[in-house]
Image: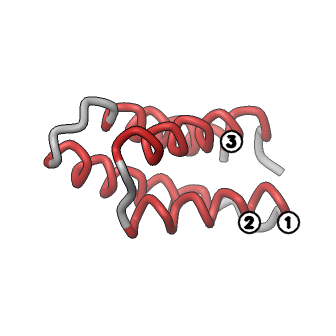
Amino acid sequence: MAYARMIYEAYSMAKAVQVSCGTTPELDEALLIIEEYLSYGGDETVLEQAAELLRVAADVIRSRGCLEWSLLEQAADTLEHAG
């Protein structure tokens, strides 16, 4: 398994944005991917997929005017480095 601490960190950042800014389908899917990876392990390429989804969600949330969107970019970077 990739660096679990970094993945938990990315997950926490994404959840914080979800709570403060609302959600998007992409954010929901990324969180589900991360949860499944943390629970069951598996192929680390799913973390790259989750990172891509977080970047799309960041764009949507930025367009809504929520300032915490940058945390999703940071979470995506973290996932890419953890995998």
Q: Secondary structure at mark 1?
A: helix
- Which residue in the structure is indicated by mark 2? 36
CB within 8 Å, label 3 to label 2 = no
- Which residue in the structure is indicated by mark 3? 7
Can you give x and y, in whole percent of width and height, for residue 43 in the image? Answer: 73, 66
Compute the Cα span from label 1 to label 3. Answer: 13 Å
Q: Is residue 68 above or below residue 11?
A: above
Nearest the camera: 22 or 60? 22
Quadrant of residue 69 in the image? top left
Compute the Cα span from label 2 to label 1. Answer: 6 Å
Can you give x and y, in whole percent of width and height, for residue 34 in the image? Answer: 65, 57
First in residue order: circle 1 vs circle 3: 3
Q: Which mark is residue 11?
A: none
Q: In the image, what residue type sits under mark 2?
A: Glu
Q: Residue at x 66, y 47 (%)?
A: 83
Quadrant of residue 57 in the image? bottom left
- Would you say 32 lies left or right of 70 here? right
Near mark 1 (Cα within 10 A), the count class, few <14, some 14-19 or many ≥20, is: few
- Would you say 83 lies left or right of 61 here? right
CB within 8 Å, label 2 to label 1 = yes
Q: Secondary structure at mark 3?
A: helix
Q: In the image, what residue type sits under mark 1?
A: Tyr
Near mark 2 (Cα within 10 A), the count class, few <14, some 14-19 or many ≥20, is: few
CB within 8 Å, label 1 to label 3 = no
First in residue order: circle 3 vs circle 2: 3
Q: Residue at x 61, y 65 (%)?
A: 32
Near mark 3 (Cα within 10 A), the count class, few <14, some 14-19 or many ≥20, is: many
**Which coloring applies here?**
secondary structure
Can you give x and y, in whole percent of width and height, for residue 68 in the image? Answer: 33, 32
Nearest the camera: 18 or 76? 18
Compute the Cα span from label 3 to label 2. Answer: 12 Å
